[in-house]
Amino acid sequence: MSVKIFGIPGSRADRSLWAIEETEIEYEHIKTNFGEDSKSSEYLDVNPNGRIPALVDGDLKLCESMAINLYLAKQYAPHLYPSNPQDEAIAYQWSVWGISEIEPLQMQIVIQKFFVPEEKRDQSIIDNAIKGLKRPLAVLDQSLKDREYLIGEQFSIADLNVAAVMLLLVAVKADLSDFANVAAWIDRCHARPALQRARAL
């Protein structure tokens, strides 16, 4: 078995565990947490950044969840990967968009709600992040108007990458009532059996 995924559920590794479960290939899941495990010399040989997830496929060592997922789809799940350069560019666009427009703001909420003791929590940081998310969520909502997925009529790696980033937005119980298209799309994406298998690892 040449493909290895390093990471644990409940972390950014969820994204790549979901992606590799979608491929249905055999792989080795090496449970690696984002603390001591990811700073070991053995792991730093895989990912010198000392973060999870990471992938090893033969001689290839790859880090960054979006890069891992795009590789997995192109290499092992062509049904998830765009069939032309135009749609491929759109998949890259949405993948970058997810980690640049959604992730920084949702992480401010995650940190305050999950990592800062309640008595030290700064509600203004949460409120400002929620306000900031309205603009990108409106963009996504408009893009999903009259369509079920981001590219064409089928679930693709573009949907997986953005929906995977937004797992944390669901975890903090973000109010999506103003973004009905986004809420329905998230439900479709997060209901996929591959994600359920990944989160049970």
Image: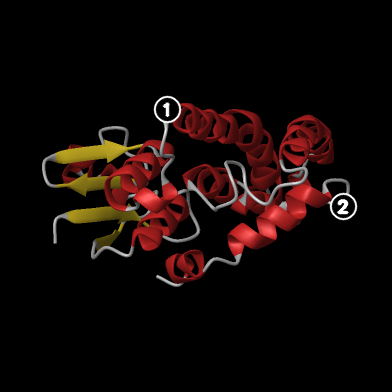
Q: Is residue 84 left or right of residue 170?
A: left
What quarter of the picture does the C terminus occupy?
A: bottom left
Give the labeled residue for mark 1.
85
Q: Where, by quadrant of the figure, is residue 24 drawn? A: bottom left
Display coloring = secondary structure
Q: Nearer the viewer, residue 184 or 166?
A: 184
Image marks 2 and 1: residues in contact by CB distance under 8 Å:
no
Q: Is residue 121 above or below residue 129?
A: below
Counting residues from the start of the chain, the first of labels 2 and 1 encountered is 1
Q: Secondary structure at mark 2?
A: loop
- For marks 2 and 1, give the CA distance: 35 Å
From the top left corner, tell me how far across and down residue 22 is, in percent. 40, 60
From the top left corner, tell me how far across and down residue 91 is, in percent. 50, 35
Q: Nearer the viewer, residue 188 or 35?
A: 188
From the top left corner, tell me how far across and down residue 200 is, in percent. 45, 72
Q: Nearer the viewer, residue 146 or 158?
A: 146
In the image, what residue occupies the spot 54% across and 53% down? Answer: 155
Residue furthest to the right: 178
**Which disc is residue 177 wearing?**
2
Can you tell which of label 2 and label 1 is closer to the viewer?
1
What residue type is disc 1 on?
Pro
In the image, what residue occupies the spot 56% across and 47% down? Answer: 159
Q: In the rendered image, is residue 172 in sight?
A: no
